[in-house]
Amino acid sequence: MAEEAGGLSRPTSAQQVAAHIRRMIFDRRLRAGERVPQDEIAAELRVSRVPVREAVIALDREGWVTSRPHLGAFVNGLDENSVRDHYELLGMMYGLAARRAVERGSDEGLTTLGTIAKELQATTDADRFGALNTAFLRQLLLMASSRRISAVARVITTNIVPGNFFAEVPGVVRIHKRGIRTVLKALKAGDGPGAEAALVELLRAETDSVVDLLADRGLLS
Protein backbone atom coordinates (compact mmCIF):
# COMPACT_ATOMS: atom_id res chain seq x y z
CA MET A 1 0.00 0.00 0.00
CA ALA A 2 1.93 3.02 1.29
CA GLU A 3 5.29 1.46 0.87
CA GLU A 4 4.43 0.75 -2.75
CA ALA A 5 3.82 4.47 -3.33
CA GLY A 6 7.58 4.89 -3.07
CA GLY A 7 7.92 5.82 0.58
CA LEU A 8 7.33 9.15 2.23
CA SER A 9 10.55 11.04 1.54
CA ARG A 10 12.73 11.81 -1.49
CA PRO A 11 14.76 8.67 -2.29
CA THR A 12 18.54 8.76 -1.93
CA SER A 13 20.91 7.32 -4.53
CA ALA A 14 21.27 4.15 -2.45
CA GLN A 15 17.49 3.80 -2.21
CA GLN A 16 17.18 4.19 -5.97
CA VAL A 17 19.82 1.52 -6.49
CA ALA A 18 18.03 -0.76 -4.03
CA ALA A 19 14.78 -0.22 -5.94
CA HIS A 20 16.58 -1.13 -9.18
CA ILE A 21 17.94 -4.38 -7.68
CA ARG A 22 14.51 -5.29 -6.29
CA ARG A 23 13.11 -4.78 -9.78
CA MET A 24 15.82 -7.05 -11.23
CA ILE A 25 14.82 -9.77 -8.74
CA PHE A 26 11.11 -9.16 -9.29
CA ASP A 27 11.55 -9.45 -13.07
CA ARG A 28 13.77 -12.52 -12.54
CA ARG A 29 16.78 -10.90 -14.16
CA LEU A 30 18.42 -11.99 -10.91
CA ARG A 31 17.33 -15.33 -9.49
CA ALA A 32 17.66 -16.97 -6.09
CA GLY A 33 21.24 -18.08 -5.47
CA GLU A 34 22.78 -15.76 -8.04
CA ARG A 35 25.48 -13.25 -7.14
CA VAL A 36 24.48 -9.58 -7.31
CA PRO A 37 26.76 -8.01 -10.01
CA GLN A 38 27.57 -4.82 -8.14
CA ASP A 39 30.10 -3.44 -10.64
CA GLU A 40 27.71 -4.01 -13.55
CA ILE A 41 24.86 -2.33 -11.69
CA ALA A 42 27.04 0.67 -10.84
CA ALA A 43 27.99 1.01 -14.52
CA GLU A 44 24.40 0.54 -15.72
CA LEU A 45 23.09 3.23 -13.37
CA ARG A 46 26.17 5.48 -13.76
CA VAL A 47 26.81 5.69 -10.04
CA SER A 48 29.82 4.92 -7.88
CA ARG A 49 30.20 1.69 -5.93
CA VAL A 50 29.29 3.52 -2.70
CA PRO A 51 25.48 3.73 -3.22
CA VAL A 52 25.52 0.18 -4.61
CA ARG A 53 27.22 -1.11 -1.45
CA GLU A 54 24.77 0.87 0.69
CA ALA A 55 21.87 -0.60 -1.30
CA VAL A 56 23.17 -4.13 -0.80
CA ILE A 57 23.46 -3.55 2.95
CA ALA A 58 19.84 -2.36 3.04
CA LEU A 59 18.66 -5.29 0.94
CA ASP A 60 20.50 -7.69 3.25
CA ARG A 61 18.59 -6.24 6.21
CA GLU A 62 15.32 -6.61 4.31
CA GLY A 63 16.07 -10.24 3.43
CA TRP A 64 16.34 -9.79 -0.35
CA VAL A 65 20.03 -10.78 -0.39
CA THR A 66 22.65 -12.35 1.87
CA SER A 67 26.09 -10.75 2.01
CA ARG A 68 29.02 -13.14 2.39
CA PRO A 69 32.45 -11.76 3.38
CA HIS A 70 34.90 -11.71 0.46
CA LEU A 71 32.34 -13.38 -1.82
CA GLY A 72 29.69 -10.71 -2.42
CA ALA A 73 25.91 -10.65 -2.07
CA PHE A 74 23.61 -13.45 -3.23
CA VAL A 75 19.89 -13.31 -3.97
CA ASN A 76 17.46 -14.91 -1.54
CA GLY A 77 13.95 -16.04 -2.29
CA LEU A 78 11.18 -14.21 -0.46
CA ASP A 79 9.21 -16.17 2.11
CA GLU A 80 5.47 -15.82 2.60
CA ASN A 81 5.65 -15.29 6.36
CA SER A 82 7.97 -12.30 5.98
CA VAL A 83 5.77 -10.78 3.26
CA ARG A 84 2.67 -11.11 5.42
CA ASP A 85 4.48 -9.71 8.46
CA HIS A 86 5.72 -6.74 6.42
CA TYR A 87 2.19 -5.67 5.51
CA GLU A 88 0.90 -6.41 9.00
CA LEU A 89 3.53 -4.04 10.42
CA LEU A 90 2.58 -1.39 7.85
CA GLY A 91 -1.06 -1.70 8.87
CA MET A 92 -0.18 -1.37 12.56
CA MET A 93 1.99 1.69 11.93
CA TYR A 94 -0.53 3.52 9.75
CA GLY A 95 -3.34 2.39 12.04
CA LEU A 96 -1.60 4.08 14.96
CA ALA A 97 -1.15 7.19 12.81
CA ALA A 98 -4.90 7.19 12.09
CA ARG A 99 -5.77 6.89 15.78
CA ARG A 100 -3.40 9.72 16.65
CA ALA A 101 -4.80 11.80 13.77
CA VAL A 102 -8.22 11.62 15.43
CA GLU A 103 -6.73 12.65 18.77
CA ARG A 104 -4.45 15.40 17.47
CA GLY A 105 -5.65 16.44 14.01
CA SER A 106 -7.69 19.48 13.04
CA ASP A 107 -10.92 19.92 11.13
CA GLU A 108 -8.87 21.57 8.37
CA GLY A 109 -6.61 18.54 8.17
CA LEU A 110 -9.59 16.22 7.97
CA THR A 111 -11.08 18.31 5.18
CA THR A 112 -7.82 17.97 3.25
CA LEU A 113 -7.90 14.20 3.75
CA GLY A 114 -11.47 14.11 2.47
CA THR A 115 -10.56 16.07 -0.65
CA ILE A 116 -7.67 13.73 -1.44
CA ALA A 117 -9.83 10.67 -0.80
CA LYS A 118 -12.54 11.98 -3.13
CA GLU A 119 -10.02 12.36 -5.97
CA LEU A 120 -8.60 8.92 -5.18
CA GLN A 121 -12.05 7.33 -5.46
CA ALA A 122 -12.70 9.05 -8.79
CA THR A 123 -9.50 8.21 -10.67
CA THR A 124 -8.96 5.14 -12.82
CA ASP A 125 -5.32 5.93 -13.63
CA ALA A 126 -2.87 3.79 -11.64
CA ASP A 127 -0.14 6.44 -11.55
CA ARG A 128 -2.56 9.11 -10.36
CA PHE A 129 -3.99 6.67 -7.85
CA GLY A 130 -0.53 5.97 -6.44
CA ALA A 131 0.27 9.67 -6.12
CA LEU A 132 -3.03 10.37 -4.38
CA ASN A 133 -2.50 7.47 -1.99
CA THR A 134 0.91 8.86 -1.06
CA ALA A 135 -0.67 12.29 -0.49
CA PHE A 136 -3.38 10.73 1.70
CA LEU A 137 -0.84 8.91 3.88
CA ARG A 138 1.40 11.96 4.16
CA GLN A 139 -1.56 14.00 5.34
CA LEU A 140 -2.44 11.28 7.84
CA LEU A 141 1.09 11.35 9.24
CA LEU A 142 1.00 15.14 9.38
CA MET A 143 -2.22 15.00 11.40
CA ALA A 144 -0.74 12.35 13.73
CA SER A 145 1.89 14.95 14.68
CA SER A 146 4.48 12.40 15.76
CA ARG A 147 8.12 12.50 14.78
CA ARG A 148 8.49 8.93 15.99
CA ILE A 149 5.72 7.56 13.76
CA SER A 150 7.10 9.51 10.79
CA ALA A 151 10.59 8.12 11.47
CA VAL A 152 9.24 4.56 11.56
CA ALA A 153 7.36 5.20 8.31
CA ARG A 154 10.59 6.19 6.58
CA VAL A 155 12.23 2.94 7.71
CA ILE A 156 9.55 0.37 6.90
CA THR A 157 7.88 1.76 3.78
CA THR A 158 10.26 0.00 1.42
CA ASN A 159 8.95 -1.65 -1.72
CA ILE A 160 8.36 -5.39 -1.84
CA VAL A 161 6.59 -4.92 -5.17
CA PRO A 162 8.78 -2.58 -7.25
CA GLY A 163 7.27 0.27 -9.22
CA ASN A 164 3.64 1.29 -8.88
CA PHE A 165 2.02 -1.14 -6.45
CA PHE A 166 -1.43 -0.38 -7.84
CA ALA A 167 -0.40 -1.09 -11.41
CA GLU A 168 1.56 -4.25 -10.62
CA VAL A 169 -0.81 -6.08 -8.23
CA PRO A 170 -4.13 -7.19 -9.76
CA GLY A 171 -7.28 -6.24 -7.89
CA VAL A 172 -5.79 -4.00 -5.20
CA VAL A 173 -7.24 -0.73 -6.51
CA ARG A 174 -10.76 -1.98 -5.80
CA ILE A 175 -9.71 -3.27 -2.36
CA HIS A 176 -7.93 -0.03 -1.59
CA LYS A 177 -10.80 2.23 -2.57
CA ARG A 178 -13.17 0.28 -0.35
CA GLY A 179 -10.70 0.35 2.54
CA ILE A 180 -10.04 4.09 2.29
CA ARG A 181 -13.79 4.76 2.38
CA THR A 182 -14.00 2.83 5.66
CA VAL A 183 -10.96 4.60 7.11
CA LEU A 184 -12.26 8.04 6.20
CA LYS A 185 -15.73 7.29 7.60
CA ALA A 186 -14.17 6.37 10.95
CA LEU A 187 -11.93 9.44 10.93
CA LYS A 188 -14.87 11.75 10.26
CA ALA A 189 -16.81 10.07 13.08
CA GLY A 190 -13.93 10.70 15.47
CA ASP A 191 -13.50 6.95 15.88
CA GLY A 192 -9.74 6.51 16.28
CA PRO A 193 -9.83 2.78 17.14
CA GLY A 194 -12.16 2.20 14.20
CA ALA A 195 -9.83 4.00 11.78
CA GLU A 196 -6.91 2.04 13.18
CA ALA A 197 -8.69 -1.29 12.74
CA ALA A 198 -9.76 -0.35 9.20
CA LEU A 199 -6.17 0.33 8.12
CA VAL A 200 -4.93 -2.93 9.61
CA GLU A 201 -7.71 -4.81 7.79
CA LEU A 202 -6.99 -2.96 4.53
CA LEU A 203 -3.35 -4.07 4.53
CA ARG A 204 -4.32 -7.64 5.38
CA ALA A 205 -6.81 -7.72 2.51
CA GLU A 206 -4.15 -6.54 0.03
CA THR A 207 -1.53 -8.99 1.30
CA ASP A 208 -3.27 -12.01 -0.23
CA SER A 209 -3.03 -10.36 -3.66
CA VAL A 210 0.68 -9.64 -3.15
CA VAL A 211 1.40 -13.21 -2.06
CA ASP A 212 -0.46 -14.57 -5.09
CA LEU A 213 1.53 -12.30 -7.43
CA LEU A 214 4.89 -13.28 -5.91
CA ALA A 215 3.97 -16.96 -6.03
CA ASP A 216 2.97 -16.66 -9.71
CA ARG A 217 6.36 -15.11 -10.45
CA GLY A 218 8.17 -17.90 -8.62
CA LEU A 219 9.63 -15.51 -6.06
CA LEU A 220 8.50 -17.22 -2.86
CA SER A 221 10.85 -19.74 -1.29
Image: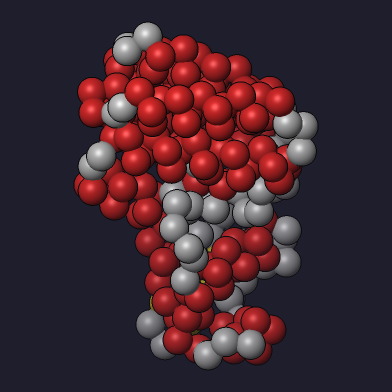
Q: Nearer the viewer, residue 32 or 130?
A: 130
Q: Residue at x 66, y 24 (%)?
A: 121
Q: Is 174 placed above or below 155 here?
A: above
Q: Is 210 placed above or below 196 here?
A: below
Q: Position of residue 105 (x, y in %)?
A: 29, 28
- Rendered-image quadrant of the N terminus: top right
How many labels were placed on the picture? 0
Q: Is residue 105 visible?
A: yes
160 horizontally vs 81: left or right: right
Tell me which corner region of the image, top left, top right, bottom left or bottom right, holds residue 92.
top left
Q: Residue furthest top?
A: 189
Q: Residue at x 23, y 48 (%)?
A: 147
Q: Residue at x 29, y 22 (%)?
A: 102
| Colour style of the rendered protein structure | secondary structure
42 horizontally vs 189: left or right: right
Tell me which corner region of the image, top left, top right, bottom left or bottom right, holds residue 17.
bottom right
Q: Nearer the viewer, residue 100 or 172?
A: 100
Q: Residue at x 35, y 54 (%)?
A: 155
Tell me which corner region of the image, top left, top right, bottom left or bottom right, holds residue 200.
top left
Q: Position of residue 38 (x, y in %)?
A: 57, 83
Q: Position of residue 183 (x, y in %)?
A: 46, 19
